[in-house]
Amino acid sequence: MKISARSTPNIALIKYWGNRNDGLRLPAADSLSMTLDSPCISATVEASDHFSVQSFDERGTENPQNEKSIARLKKHWELTRNYLDTINRIDGMPDAVSIVIRSEIPPAIGIASSAAVFSCLSEAHAGFVSLTREEISILARLGSGSAARSVFGGFVTLENTGGTDIGSAHARQVAPETHWQLHDVIIVPSREQKKVGSTEGHAMASTSPLFKERITQIPRRMQECTDAITKKDFEKLQHVSEEDSLDMHHVMEKQNPPLKYLSEETRRIIREIEALRKSDHLEVLYTMDAGPTVHLICTDEALKAINDFADVQKGCIVFRAKVGGGSTLV
Ligand code: PMV
């Protein structure tokens, strides 16, 4: 039996940074994101006598995964089986699978390709057994914490549920994709692969003297962000999400070793957007994940001005997305 699925990245408005259990990717705090409708990853999974992975890039050319990413995909498969065993759903699951991944996302440029890959694979794996959306989000989390959120469309939290076992953090939808039509104009200043990925970064988060304080602020920010989304209050969303993104980067910069993901280009784009939104009264906010890429989230009314701004950024690649529906079987 062959099972195919597709998925997309999400952009965090309240960021996930640091784990309480690195091996199981149980986050230290809750997070909240908007699922995007593009770019897309698709995957086909088939029972096989041994685990294998093949992947193709946006042009359809085979793009062999390096050893590290094959090991991560294999670990995800093993954790998937462990989790299904703990919830008594292992029957019907093959012992090994061959995986074919097709990606439209240039890797490691800060638009969450791992979130799309692991949510997509989890959606496909769940096709062998029958799981709830929350259970699929747990499978996705085992490959990449933020991937849990791409299992749902619209506005989505990744929440800790109290326990310490493998299933004790899952995603939940706050509002569907039809609730608020926001756009994400993604400006990528550099296609250079980042040196330190988020898996290694999470593991060192607690070495930052700012980490504890960040964790104490998250429940308030989650509440403000949820309220802003529910009431479609853009100004409130802007304040809390920019506060949280900048705070995460401060924490990262003080980690040991320090992680400096933002570049001079990132800071210039932020300054220009702050000036533009003030002069033209635009509903736009900026947020950055683990890379120099700037996500400009804006309303329908602001979209033209933000697209015009993005189009004149020299040497940058621009992606355009809007709120999307999350992973699905195809
Ligand atoms: O899911 P991971 O392990 O790649 O971590 C994602 C971390 C951030 O992108 C920086 C924040 C987030 O919540 O997506």
Image (cartoon, grey):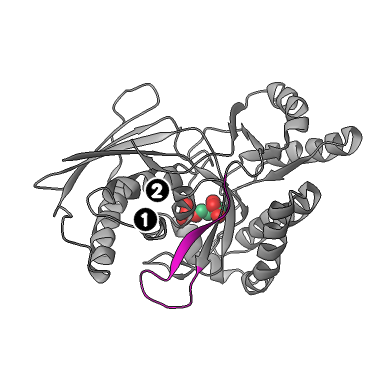
- SS for callout 1: helix
- Which residue is at 24% across, 59% downward? 78
Q: Quadrant of residue 188?
A: top right
Q: Is residue 323 above or below residue 255?
A: above
Residue 122 - label: none
> In front here: 177 or 254?
177
- Which residue is at 46% across, 39% downward? 8
Residue furthest left in the image: 49
Mark 2 C-beta closer than 8 Å to ligand 1: no
* Residue 206 in the image, given as x and y percentages of width and height: 55, 71
* Residue 145 in the image, given as x and y percentages of width and height: 45, 57
- Which residue is at 40% across, 55% downward? 133
Residue linked to disc 2? 119
- Which residue is at 51% across, 33% downward? 38
Answer with mark 2 or mark 1, whichever residue precedes in sequence: 2
**Do residues under tags 2 and 1 come within 8 Å of each other at their CB atoms?**
yes
Front of the two marks 2 and 1: 1
**What is the CA distance from the residue labelled 2 to the residue labelled 1?**
8 Å
Please, what is the three-letter code of the amino acid marked with disc 1? Ile
Residue linked to disc 1? 136
* Residue 49 in the image, given as x and y percentages of width and height: 8, 47
Residue numbers of the magenta segment: 160-176
